[in-house]
Image (tube, rainbow, N blue to C red):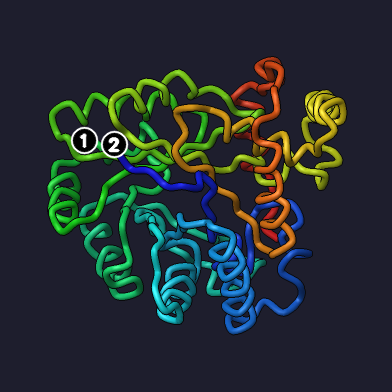
Amino acid sequence: MFKLDNKLGLGLAALGRPGYITLGHHQNIGDDKSKDNMRNQCHRVLNFAYEKGIRYFDVARVYGESEEFLSSWIRKQNQFAGFVGSKWGYEYLAEWNVETDQHERKDHSHPFLKKQWVETRMNLGKSIDLYQIHSVTPESSVLQDKDVLKELHTIKKGGVDIGISTSGPQQKETITELLEVNKSEKLFTFIQCTINIFEQSCIESLKKASDQGINVIAKEIFANGRLTELNVNLHQENFLEINKVALKLNITIEDLALIWVYQLPFVKIVLTGASTIDQIERNINSLNKIKIDLPSLNNFQLSQTDYWNTRKSLSWN
């Protein structure tokens, strides 16, 4: 069974491209969003994270230059003892612009897998440990594509773990489908799923996956900034009640959001999307309070329609 000493991992979605949908992304990155500046910013954050014991790093073909940024940083290390996951299935279209009509395009076809796998290997070489299908939903039908599954088996035989990430209001259905497919394929060993205080819909499905030996990676634990102090107008009724719980515990809402996910026993990796050293330092400091006894937060989950429609409405910045 896969195991890291530190469950906290770093995702580079907000560090690999100039625009992202996390609240406050522009302020975190600053006005200079040139590739050179963002590469340097990414490397500084990676240096700090690695020094503090973080060993899981998450990238994707669609995260702009995230693979290249991570790879160029790895090559600077005397010895790299990390675990790297990347994803295929989306194409980055923004051409390093924040304001654009289309940022990305989804393609779960077999030819696109072959194309993006070559690109990932060119970027990461042997530093790729996990390859995931990006944002699988029931309508994509990719888990039923025999050519895709055969190609993924070939990649797995080369020593790379195979997984999926999920997104959207039907995450639970996707996980159920994957578990069914895996009975015969025995292919997938990781699931990366959106799970946070606002989005708790797939907890029981993830428990089943974990019981079947699949490693669970929690993503979007801060709900793209909606579970941070930057949220001033979204889901305010639930947000303010959650903040009251945090204040009673003498912690911040960010502490609470991270600790709640970190304490879930079936979660193997908790991803932070920190884009500054200050952010990741706060995330790491939250772990000092990890043994705090939390009350039940089940009542604060949103309806899936509310959660995902609001996420879809967030602005690239």
Q: Residues within 10 Å of mark 1 (few under 14, many from 20)?
A: few
Expressed as whole percent of the image width and height from the top left, the position of residue 20 reads: 63, 58
| Residue pointed to by mark 2 | 141
* Picture quarter with the N terminus: top left
> Closest to the observer: 290 or 304?
290
Mark 1 residue type = Gln
Q: For the point 31% across and 70% down, which residue is it? A: 119
Position of 138 with respect to 145 (left or right) is: right
Q: Secondary structure at mark 2?
A: loop
Q: Quadrant of residue 254?
A: top right
Q: For the point 64% across and 81% down, which residue is it? A: 37
Q: Is residue 26 above or below residue 21?
A: below
Q: Secondary structure at mark 1?
A: helix
Q: For the point 59% across and 84% down, which residue is it? A: 36
* Picture quarter with the C terminus: bottom right
> Closest to the observer: 216 or 147?
216
Label number found at residue 144: 1
Q: Quadrant of residue 260?
A: top right
Q: Residues within 10 Å of mark 2 (few under 14, many from 20)?
A: few
Q: How many marks?
A: 2
> Closest to the observer: 162 or 168?
162
Expressed as whole percent of the image width and height from the top left, the position of residue 241 reads: 83, 23
Mark 2 residue type = Ser
Label number found at residue 90: none
Position of 199 with respect to 73 (left or right) is: right
